[in-house]
Amino acid sequence: MRKPTLGVNMIIKDEAENLPKSLAPAMELCDEAVVVDTGSRDGSRALARSYGARVFDFPWRGDFSAARNQALYSSRTDYVLWLDADNHIPPKDFEALRGALPPLGAAPAVLMCAEKVLPQGDLLWQKRVFPNRPGVFFRGVVHEQLSHPEWMAVRLVDAEILHWGYADPSEAKRKGERNLKLLLEAPGTREGDFYHLYQTGRTLMNLRRHREALEYLQLAAQSPTANLSLWSHAAILLSECWKALGNPARAEATLRNLASMRPCYGPGRYYLGRFLYGAGKAAEAAPELSAALMHGLSDPGWGSAPEKLSFTCAQLLGKILGEAGDEAGAEKAYRAALEFSPKNPEPRIALAELALVAGRTLQARELIGKALELAPFHRKARHLARELSGGAA
């Protein structure tokens, strides 16, 4: 059977600065590129054409799905990979997606892969590759989602797409305000659709407009949805919102409800443990953090950063256990933190302090030496090094 062709779709507006990093490398990998321009004034259209893309003009109507569907309707390949102008897909990841495509004649499939947000490192699993056929399209004015027949298989592929569009805080704020305007005007938001309520609340939280976010997050938490991942994240955001508004009791109750509803949900247990520690309830926090590590802190449905959360969770657990006099438990937690972030000096410094308390001076010296190799000017590491050397500079 013939192998299916794979094209790239992109919608752009004034992306001349980004296209050399996103579209140009993709042109060497795909069978076709379709670019829909929604009103560029910086030469983006000509630049995209110079790379060999087929470029179409599409007047902006405040609807990202409409523009993305226009690109899809203009595509000629069997399958389509959608990218934004602030996305880059490495060649090996593109080939992994191509290799996962079903042969022509077989049942079609939708492929999911991870979007890695830079520089934070958050991972978000998204439906990125889909068959070019009727019944497959995008919906939603912003944060658009792929709609496809339920019988169509969805496969996870070990591939990453890098996304740098929110690395600049001022640009992130501009995009957030743009997205908020679209969400507030969307019929789905007014009609109480869970996804729209969640995205509106999340956007308002990112813009630090907590009092406005509260309304939408409360409605999202009460709205029926089959998406447990986003519902759980709405609860976490709602707790953060209550905390920011000076109501820690409601913040704690929200997290305890999440932990009760989903006891095996690692991120929920982590946020509850972190909150309890901050509220001076260290003894209650420790089992929550232990449970979080046991169940894992990954939730690609909303883009958690599992390595970062796991490191923070283990490091905090080590601190709590150490303060409680459980040196063995603290050491185990710090060693877990070290596995999650081998280049971070903090776990080694904490382990060195435990070694000193236990009289293991040689081990403490080795740990501090490694920590100083990673961070030569780390104040605490330098202080411990002086202490170990008898106060010598």
Image (cartoon, rainbow, N blue to C red):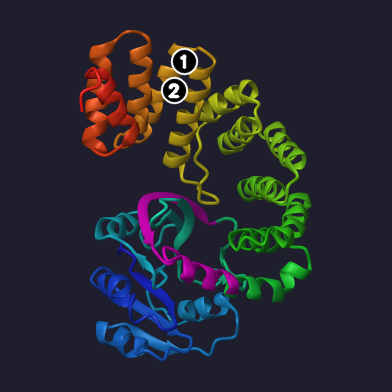
- Quarter holding residue 12: bottom left
Q: Give the quadrant of the C terminus.
A: top left
Kind of residue at disc 1: Gly
- Quarter holding residue 116: bottom left
For the record, the magenta segment spans 152-177
Helix, strand or loop under label 2:
helix
363 inside magenta stretch: no
Q: Is residue 298 left or right of residue 8?
A: right
Neighbourhood count class around disc 2 (C-alpha, 10 Å): few under 14, some 14–19, many 20 upward = many
- Say which of 249 and 323 sits in front: 323
Residue 346: image location, x then y, percent: 36, 32
Q: Residue at x 45, y 50 (%)?
A: 123
Residue 223: image location, x then y, percent: 77, 53
Q: How many marks?
A: 2
Kind of residue at disc 2: Ala
Q: Is residue 260 left or right of residue 339?
A: right
- Say which of 330 and 389 sits in front: 389
Residue 68: image location, x then y, percent: 50, 76
Q: State the mark number for residue 329.
A: 1
Q: Residue at x 30, y 64 (%)?
A: 2
The residue indicated by pointer 2 is 333
Q: Give the quadrant of the N terminus.
A: bottom left
Q: Residue at x 25, y 18 (%)?
A: 388
Q: Residue at x 33, y 69 (%)?
A: 5
Neighbourhood count class around disc 1 (C-alpha, 10 Å): few under 14, some 14–19, many 20 upward = some
Helix, strand or loop under label 1:
helix
